[in-house]
Image (cartoon, rainbow, N blue to C red):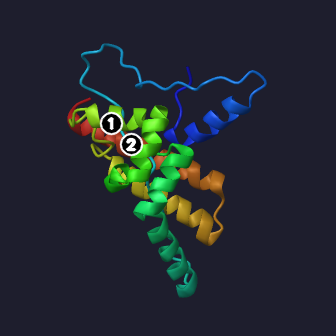
Amino acid sequence: MLPESTGSLGQFVQAAAKAKSPFTVGTGFYPKVDSGDSGGPIIGGASLWVVNSGNAQKERAAWDFEKFLDSEKSQVGVHTTTGYFPVLKSALDDPTDKQWVAQNPEFGTAVTQLEKTPLNTATQGCSQGVMPQIRQDVQNAISAVVLQGADATKELASVQKLADSQIAAYNAKLGD
C-alpha cells in the first residue's frame, strides 16, 4: 500500500504495465481508523502562482498559461493522463473524462471518496487558527527567495520561528 498524490497514478499505471512482471495497479479509499469517523480526505495543491516579476509581458504570458491550464479541456487531459484530481467539476462531467474513468476505474477512486466525504470542520482544509497567517508568511518567504535572492535556509528558519510563535500565542489564547 502506498498513499500518494492522485497526480502520480498515471505514472504508476504505466510503470506497472511495463514492469518485468506486469501487474495491475489497484486503488482504494484512504483508510480511516474507524469506519464511522466523520473525517476524510481533503484536496491539497490545486494552486497556480504568477509571481510579480516587474515584467508585464512575462506576467501576461504566465496568466494566459494559467487560464489554459484551468480550462476544462486541459483539466480533462491532466486527469486522464496523470490521475491528478481536476480543479473543475465540469471536467469530471466531460464525455472524454467519463469514458476514461469507465475504462480505468482507478482514476475515479479519489473523486468518489471526496464526493462521499461529509463537509465538516475536519474535512474543509486548513482554515482554522493561525493557518492563514502562516500560509501568507510562507508565501512571502518563497517570494523573497525567488524574487530577491534571499537565502532559502534562512528564510525557512525565519518562517518556522514565526510560525512557532504564532501557534504558541494562538494556543495560549485558547487556554492550551
The residue labelled by disc 2 is 43
User: Which quadrant is home to the C terminus?
Assistant: top left
Q: Is residue 30 above or below residue 42?
A: above
Percent x, y for residue 5? Answer: 52, 38
Percent x, y for residue 149? Answer: 66, 68
Q: Residue furthest right?
A: 20
Percent x, y for residue 153? Answer: 65, 51
Percent x, y for residue 6? Answer: 50, 39
The circle drawn on residue 114 is 1
Q: Is residue 86 visible?
A: no
Question: With 100 as the anchor, is 129 left or right in this view?
Answer: left
User: For residue 42, what is the image quadrant?
Assistant: top left
Question: With 113 as the anchor, is 106 left or right in this view?
Answer: right
Question: With 146 as the anchor, is 92 left or right in this view?
Answer: left
Q: Nearer the viewer, residue 17 or 87?
A: 17
User: Mark 2 or mark 1, which is nearer the start of the sequence?
Assistant: 2
Residue drawn at point x = 38 percent, y = 42 percent: 43
Q: Is residue 58 above or below residue 51?
A: below
Residue drawn at point x = 56 percent, y = 65 percent: 144
Q: Amino acid at mark 1?
A: Leu
